[in-house]
Image (cartoon, coloured by chain):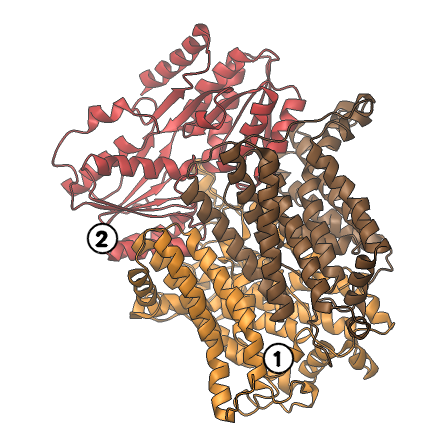
Chain colours: A brown, B orange, C red
Amino acid sequence: MSEIFTTAVLVAVGASAIRLAVPLLLAALGETFGQRSGVLNLGVDGIMLLGAFAGYYAVLKTDNVWLGLLAGAIVGLILGLASAVIAVTLKAEQGISGIGVFLFGLGMSDLLFQKLVGTPIPIDTFPQVDIPLLSDIPYVGEIFFQHSLVIYLAFLSIPVATFVINRTTFGMKIRAVGEYPDAADTLGVSVAGVRYATEIIGGTLAGIAGAVLAITLGIFQQNLTNGAGFIAIALVYFGAWRPTGIMLGALLFGFVNALVLELKTLEIIPRDLSNLAAMAPAIITILALVFVARRFRAPSALTKPFTRGT
Amino acid sequence: MSINLSHQQRRILAYSIPVLAVFAALIFGAVMLLLLGANPIEGYSEMFVGAFGSGDALIATILKATPLLFVGTGIVIAFRANVINIGAEGQMVLGGLFATIAALYLPEMPPIIMVPLVLMAGILGGALWGWIPGALKAYYRVNEILSTIMLNIVAVQLMSYLLRGPLIDPAEIERGTRIPQTERLMESADLPIIFGDRFHIGPVLAILGAIATYYLLWRTPLGYRLRAVGLSEHAARYAGIPVRRTIALALTLSGAFAGLAGAVLVFGSESHRMVTDGSTMGFTGSAGFNGIVAALLGGLHPIWTIPASFLFGGLIVGGQALQRAVQVPSALIVALNGLVVVFVVAADRYRVKLLSVDGRDQEIADDGKTPLDDEDSALGSVYDAAPRGTDSYGQDEFNEDPR
Amino acid sequence: MAALALVGAACSSDDVGGEDFKVAIIAPSASNDLAFTQSMVDAANMLQEDGVIGEVSVTDGTFVVEDAAVAIRDYASDGFDLVIAHGSQYGGSLQEIAPDFPEVSFAWGTAADTFGLPNVFSYEAASDQGGTVMGKMAAALSQSGNVGIVGPIEVGDAKLYVDGFEAGVLSQNGNATVNINYIDSFSDVALASEAAQSLIGAGADVLSGTAQMTVGAVGVAKTEGVLWFGTQSNQTVLAPEIVVASQVYHWEHMLEDMIKKVGDGTLGGELYEITFANDGLVIEYNEDFDLPDDVKQIGDDAINTFKDEG
């Protein structure tokens, strides 16, 4: 038992948790913008997959990981725009249209991969960047400050997002549109405009999340995300639509996954029970929500398309 | 649009919108086929023949549609109560597992007892997996989208654990191959065949289930409560309806249908055993997601979900035939599936607009006439009935629940 | 795929198969997954090029068992001579379908059961053999005496390989540490990548793994400079710097034998196993990897032992 708590193991688990959390974090952050403005997008996983392929392919062709990120962002942007058209202008049923985007993204990314690439070819991955001074701190340095630039930027986006939502005019509009679309409309805020913007942000972040995943892993494969997009959506609820909460949720999920992996390596979890252990992240996420008393409520207009005069 | 159409004309146009949307998606698909070097005309004709072109094809389509109809019916119930259930994948798995366990551990009994027993076990399993998110929402305010997604993960690991461990076919251990499957389940639990080799009672049960749901929703007090909560939680609570419990019940019923789908899948399957590849979709065929689409195609009305499931089943079966015939990667079919969903969902608005007279009909007043009699209420207010409600502000207790 | 001199030896009689011989393959993953499915598709295509098979039809990505059952029936009724159900999970269905088509020959793998039916062949790979051979080489190459293995779910072919590899390591070096991590998924690439990290963190300097999600593990091995042994297909292309060797499944001989039997009127009833002895299993070395001669000798000796055992 004492093996678990050696610092080396804890450090490894911590660093692993952060790596696993990043794609979830980015995608969930994007979805938060959309949901705060009242739009539910269940297609995040599909956007992530297409973003992942775009990023992978771009790096394959150009050997430049940053171009890969850009490619993922652009693909995500386009899909976010499409999602906005479907949800905001066409006022489609939000609980269902997203499923279509998911299936489309799942199939299309696989199809493109099979036709344009074929057999898996590995690509470059993000270089590790140790933050000077901080990365030398024993233990803490290894967990937090020896990652790639992308990871640092991803975590930086949390306070940025919090700032945008809480302290900018745009953020105020987002919140208004999500809570009182009629009132916002009366005051001259373009409900559709704000929702388009948030969906585009959401799609872009999801595309980036996918690209980060593919480039970090250095490969693409059918269904690379393996449901990460859905977990990201779940995390939005977990985090009560607040970026900090979402970050905590992503880290919790990543941490439990990393811990279970480590326990399997150390054979503390017997192989017969390994499936039961694999349930842990999901169960713990639910339990965490059960036991933490919460007073946050959903954006009132979530999933409700807006029509003036209704 | 300021074209003046007669009532009849508008109805016809409305019903054809989903069909037109499917066509639009198929045109995109044709472009993709061309790019892949296949002949779209040949491909699509194979698709049609493969889905509807022969007795065997029709049977395959109907059998494929059966889980869609079960799940879709359950989704209709959930949606009518304004609940989004994306946990059907996991609920199907639990239904299959419970039914399998019943067949493995109950003593041998004649089919007339055995079949209903295993199916009921399946219903129980799915209902449980629907009840958990329902109760979590009702009593702990845990959002159902989060809990159903998490429970899908738990379900697949549970299936792997059981089929690798306690439920594994002993012969597998002997042979050393350890394929995660059960032994061939007892024959008296096989779903009775009503026609030919493969046409079992599953489709009949699904249709009966859809009809029963129609009566449930529009002819019983419970159904009234479900729909009331779906239209306006605020008003429903004001009317004395226990909103949280009703929502939990909606999820439970929805899960029960999905569980039944899972049980039918196991006992109607070719192999008459439960087997896993480690994913939910390997067992369910994505019926947990596609059932949601079928429900929408059916205008969130249980009766219309029947033809909608049939058509969607045809799309899937046809797609597989297409893939075999012109040898494109099966990924194309998944993408095409998604496109169809997107187009149909996006076009739905126009369908609804065409049907409703002035856009807002209060469904609570509906006296339950069939869609053909009462298209303005049932289908027209589909748009209003499912996740809508006039109330979105207000500080009452219910609105504090994270949604 | 690398050229295989072995095929030349066997591609012989003009009366085996022929241009009217139609073969269908139903498989759960993509045809170019660099793993399980690809190995069979490649074998069939090879035989087609040699004229032994006239037409090859592949239905890949069929992870839904009932859909596979429909496909098997369809192919059987469409006049195909040999229908290959290339997935362990298809067995139960095949057992019910095969009796309905007594003039069609079916093959099922990886498995060891023909259900007592006269028109069903079964086949499996003795992947533990290659596992043992490479395990020995891994132990010889490891400087830390610690080897790690990443697995999907502990079933079937995967379990066979992992058990063989572990046995090989321990037989070469009784003091070695072997850590095994089954990630409980065939598709979670990110988790496989973190599992590899975890194994490396526990001290492994040589890794191996099986199933398609191990591309994630190979990527980590590449970044960390840890050696890799692959299985099911030649994985050199994934990381030419660190892949030592791969156990490659060569189904061609077996397939050709089946086709010959079908031509002679025997439609099934035999259990096939590809092994070193019958050239169904081959260790393909990475030409660019500088493998010390003595280590290669260990590998060759082990292979020869298997060959002698038959």
Q: Chain of mark 1?
A: B
Side of A148 where C16 appears, left or right = left
Q: Which mark is residue C102?
A: 2
Q: Which mark is residue B82?
A: none
Residue type (three-letter) at the residue carrying disc 1: Val
The secondary structure type at the circle numbered 2 is loop
Side of C10 where B387 appears, left or right = right
Residue A18 image offset from top left, x and y in percent = 73, 36
Tell me, yes or no, if residue B116 can be seen here.
no
The secondary structure type at the circle numbered 1 is helix
Q: Quadrant of the C terminus of chain B?
A: bottom right
Q: Quick check: do tags 2 and 1 share a chain?
A: no
Q: Residue B28: which quarter of the image?
A: bottom left
Residue at position x 48%, y 83% in the image: B13
Q: In the rendered view, would you say A252 is above or below A131?
A: below
Q: CA distance from mark 2 to mark 1?
A: 52 Å
Q: Which mark is residue B382?
A: 1
Q: In the rendered view, would you say B355 is above or below B387?
A: below
Residue B174 image offset from top left, x and y in percent = 44, 37
Q: Quadrant of the N terminus of chain B?
A: bottom right
